[in-house]
Image (spheres, rainbow, N blue to C red):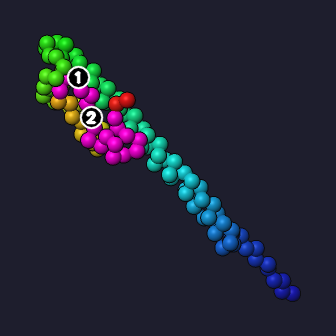
Amino acid sequence: MKTTKQLRQAGFTLVEIMIVVAIIGLLAAIAIPNFVRSRSVAQASACVNNLKQVDGAASLFALENGKKTGDAINYPGDLTPYIKLNAAGRIPGCPAGGTYTEDVVGNNPACSLASSVTPPHVLP
């Protein structure tokens, strides 16, 4: 007597796989914009912190060298001894790729990205 074996098929159907892919896509659509937004906020915060450090270094430079408001600053050479340098031995730059300028005692330092990005990279 011959008996036929019933093969049990294991696995997922195409519909089940499509539902899982749709759910993953929906979660990604929600998460990615929030990640990008939080990244830009973090970069702006770091840039503003760096601008505060540069401003403090400019104040120390002016105080030690008898400079007054309106006197010129040779950025970054004059400020290098008054600020903590990064691993490359330079004043830390904008994490979003901007450049800093500080040319006059008494003026706030500025980032080249300033208002061109959201949130802006300016001192309050």
User: Which residue is pictured at 62% across the width and 64% down the height?
Assistant: 22
Residue 30 seen in the current view: yes
The location of residue 117, given as percent across then percent down, is 36, 46
* Residue type at the position of mark 2: Ala
Q: Which numbered dot is residue 106?
A: 1
In-image side of 113 versus 105 (left or right): right
Label 2 element class? strand
Q: Magenta span has 120?
A: yes
User: Which residue is pictured at 45% across the width and 48% down the height?
Assistant: 36
Q: Quadrant of residue 104?
A: top left
Q: Which stretch did the figure color magenta?
A: 104-122
The location of residue 56, given as percent across then percent down, is 27, 21
Q: Magenta span has 45?
A: no
In-image side of 3 versus 16 (left or right): right
User: Mark 1 to mark 2: distance in Å?
Assistant: 12 Å
* Residue type at the position of mark 1: Gly
In this rendering, the answer to whether 123 lies above or below 63 is below
In this rendering, the label closer to the viewer, 1 or 2: 1
Q: Nearer the viewer, residue 21 or 109?
A: 109
Near mark 2 (Cα within 10 A), the count class, few <14, some 14-19 or many ≥20, is: many
The location of residue 82, given as percent across then percent down, is 21, 20
Q: Quadrant of residue 86?
A: top left
- The residue pinned by badge 2 equals 110
In-image side of 116 versus 33 (left or right): left
Label 1 element class? loop
